[in-house]
Amino acid sequence: MILFIKQSFKTSVEDAISYFEGEITTAYNNENLKAEWEDSENQEGEIEKGIATEVENLLNTILNERESATKLQKNYESYQELNKYVSDKKVQEAINQARNDVNDNAGVKAKAHYTEVVDRYQTKLDDIKTQITDDRKDTISVQNNKAVKNSIDNLLSNAQAVKSLVLANEAKHKEQTAKFDAVQAEWTRVYYKLSTSDQSSQLEEYLSQLADEQTKLNTIKTNIADFYAKGMSDSKNAETIASLDAINSIILSIEKTQSDNYVDEIAKDNLARYTTFLNTIATTEKDYKDAVAMIDKFSNIQNEDYDAAIEDILKAYEGIYEYASKISKLRTDAETAYKAVEGAELYDVDELNTATAVTYSAEINAKLT
C-alpha cells in the first residue's frame, strides 16, 4: 500500500483519493474495514499504516500544498504590486528629469558631481528592480515588500530633490565668491594703505599680520572651489561666511590699531633715532677731545732738537680745532630739529645728522695720521 501511495502522489492527488476510496470499499465489502483502518504490526514487527493514517497523511499533504500555493500566489501578487509601484511612482522619469536639471542648472565645475549622483540613483533603481525579481524567485517578495517600497520612496524623494540641491549649490557658491572678493579687496586696500603711508618700524609687524590673513584667505578660496565641486556649498555656507567675516574683522582691526597708535609708534622711532644720533655724536666728541689732547702733548714738548718737527705736526693739526664749532652746531641743530617734530612727522636723523657725525669722526682721525 505504501509504495502505491508514493507512486500515486507522483501522478496526482485525485488518483490517491480514488485509490483510498477503492481500499475502503474493498475492506468494507470484505467486512475487514476495521482491521484495515487501524495501523497494525506485521510478522517482522514492522508497523503498517492503516487507511486512516494514510488518509490523514494525504490530507496533510493537500493542506501543505494549498498553503504553499497560497504563499506562491501572494509572493507573485507582491511581485506584481512592486513592479506597478515603481511604474506608478514614475521613478525613472524622476531620474531622467534630475539628469536634465543637472545639465540645465549646474555649473561646469559642479556638473560632474551631480552627474555622478544621478548615475548612483539610476544604479539604485536598477538594483531595486533586480531585487524585486530575485525576491520573487526566492519567495521572499511579501517579506521584503515594505522595505522595497521604502527604498523606492526614498529614491524618488532623492531624485526629485536634485534640482533644488543644484540651485542651492550655485546660489551659495556665488554668495561665497562675492564675499571672498569683498574681503580680498579690503585686504588689498589696507595692505596698500599701510605699506605706502606707514613710516614706522611697526609696519613690518602689521604687514606680517596681514600676510597671515592672506594665507587664511587662500585656504578659504581653495575650500570654496572644493565645496562647490562636491555640491557642499550650501551645507558649508554658514561656516565659510563666518570665516570670511572673521578675517575681515581682523583686517579692519589691524588698520585701526595702526591708525590709533601711529603717532606713538613714530614718536618711539624718533626717540630711538635721536638716541642713536646722541650716541654717535658722543663718539665724535670723544674723538675730537682725544685729538686735542694729543695736540696738547706735542705742544708741551720742550726739546730744541724736535722744535722743527713738532712745529710741522702742530701746523698739520691746526684744522682739527674747527670741528669744535661744527660738532657743537650739529648737536644743537639735531636737538632743535628733534624738538620741533610734531605728530606723525618722521625725524630722520640717520640721514641728516648721524651720517654727518660719523664723517666728522673720520675726518678728525684722518688728520691725526
Image (cartoon, rainbow, N blue to C red):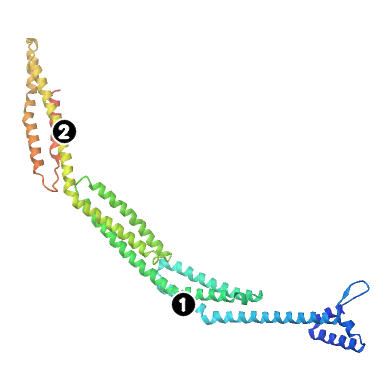
Quadrant location of the C terminus in the rendered image: top left
Numbered badge on residue 233: none
Look at the picture and state if 308 lies above or below 2. Answer: above
Q: Is residue 254 left or right of residue 86?
A: left
Q: Earlier in the sequence, mark 1 or mark 2?
A: 1
Look at the picture and state if 211 lies above or below 281. Answer: below
Are the residues at dot 1 and dot 2 in contact (C-beta closer than 8 Å)?
Answer: no
Residue 38 on image: x %, y %: 86, 80
Q: As rendered, which of 163 and 115 lies closer to the eye?
A: 163
**Pair 1/2: label in front:** 2
Q: Is residue 222 left or right of residue 8?
A: left
Residue 316 in sight from this viewpoint: yes
Question: For the residues marked 1 and 2, what is the alpha-carbon distance in whole angstroms?
Answer: 83 Å
At label 1, which amino acid type do we have? Gln
Element type at mark 1: helix
Residue 27 figure quarter: bottom right
Q: Which residue is mark 1?
A: 97
Residue name at image x 54 percent, y 71 percent: 124
At label 2, which amino acid type do we have? Asn
Residue name at image x 84 percent, y 85 percent: 20
Element type at mark 2: helix
Quadrant location of the N terminus in the rendered image: bottom right
Residue 9 on image: x %, y %: 80, 81
